């Protein structure tokens, strides 16, 4: 439907890191390939950061390369990590003006938390990053106009922690006692207060995949322009 083609390459856990790096370098050199992504986590004998840094920045459609992170940091063109990029598109879709709004990001990962905070800053939001060492998470989230929960822990955000009318984006992916997928947010409780809230599944996940397609298309367009 999109006109993009993809190839899934699976390798055994016994594959060595040099073998994987050699394969990535071969894909870097292949002009028919516009985007490369490596599914994390990797086997313990591999250095994930070294593997990511081996991907050519021009093909880093996941947005994890240090060049992509640096471009985001200083506001230069680059590939944004797909999950926070998708979250920003969701905020854009509801027409919220983030200027001056207080946004709280729960989580500080390189994949979601940190880039999410930087993207919100670019829209002139006032951003607070909370994490496992935050002494009073509830005090922070009760001030928030926007809350992004991205820690991978069930019920990290409950109804008593949310300001009425707040926008709540749930990036978490967990399973409850029944084995059903759920997020980081107590959806049934928080939905009674939130102005907007994303479900799990069916919320951020599809947007992550959509932004991966956007990044790949952009990579192809840049390659064609060179």
Image (cartoon, rainbow, N blue to C red):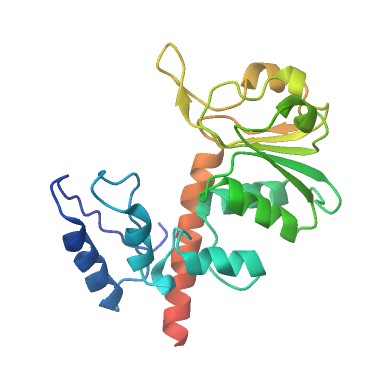
Q: Quadrant of the C terminus?
A: bottom left
Camera-side residue of 177 and 6: 177
Q: Residue at x 32, y 60 (%)?
A: 51
Q: Residue at x 66, y 25 (%)?
A: 157
Question: Residue 225, position in %: x, y?
Answer: 47, 86
Query: Is 3 positioned to the left or the right of 189 in the image?
Result: left
| Residue 214 seen from this side | yes
Q: Quadrant of the N terminus?
A: bottom left
* Identity of the residue furthest to the bottom in this view: 226
| Residue 95 seen from this side | no
* Identity of the residue furthest to the top in this view: 177
As drawn, 185 above or below 29: above
Q: Residue at x 31, y 71 (%)?
A: 33
Question: Residue 110, position in %: x, y?
Answer: 52, 51
Question: Residue 209, position in %: x, y?
Answer: 46, 49
Query: Is 190 positioned to the left or the right of 19 in the image?
Result: right
* Identity of the residue furthest to the right in this view: 100
Query: Is 99 positioned to the left or the right of 178 in the image?
Result: right
As drawn, 135 above or below 215: above
Q: Quadrant of residue 181?
A: top left
Q: Residue at x 82, y 51 (%)?
A: 97
Total marks placed: 0
As drawn, 210 above or below 157: below
Question: Residue 197, position in %: x, y?
Answer: 68, 32
């Amino acid at each position: 439907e999109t006109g993009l083609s993809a190839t899934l390459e699976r390798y055994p856990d016994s594959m060595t890191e040099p073998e994987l790096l050699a394969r990535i370098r071969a894909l870097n050199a292949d002009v028919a390939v516009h985007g490369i992504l490596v599914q994390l986590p990797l086997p313990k004998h591999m250095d994930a950061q070294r593997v990511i840094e081996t991907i050519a920045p021009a093909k880093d459609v996941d947005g994890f390369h240090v060049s992509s992170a640096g471009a985001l940091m200083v506001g230069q063109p680059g590939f944004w990590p797909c999950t926070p990029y998708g979250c920003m598109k969701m905020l854009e879709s509801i027409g919220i003006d983030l200027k001056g709004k207080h946004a709280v990001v729960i989580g500080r990962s390189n994949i979601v938390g940190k880039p999410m905070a930087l993207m919100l800053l670019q829209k002139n939001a006032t951003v607070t990053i909370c994490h496992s060492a935050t002494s009073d998470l509830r005090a922070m989230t009760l001030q928030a106009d926007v809350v992004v929960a991205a820690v991978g822990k069930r019920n990290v955000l409950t109804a008593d922690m949310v300001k009425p009318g707040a926008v709540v984006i749930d990036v978490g992916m967990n399973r409850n006692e029944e084995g059903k997928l759920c997020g980081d947010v107590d959806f049934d409780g928080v939905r009674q207060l939130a102005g907007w809230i994303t479900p799990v599944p069916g919320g951020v996940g599809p947007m992550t995949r959509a932004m991966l397609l956007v990044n790949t298309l952009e990579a192809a367009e840049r390659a064609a322009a060179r």
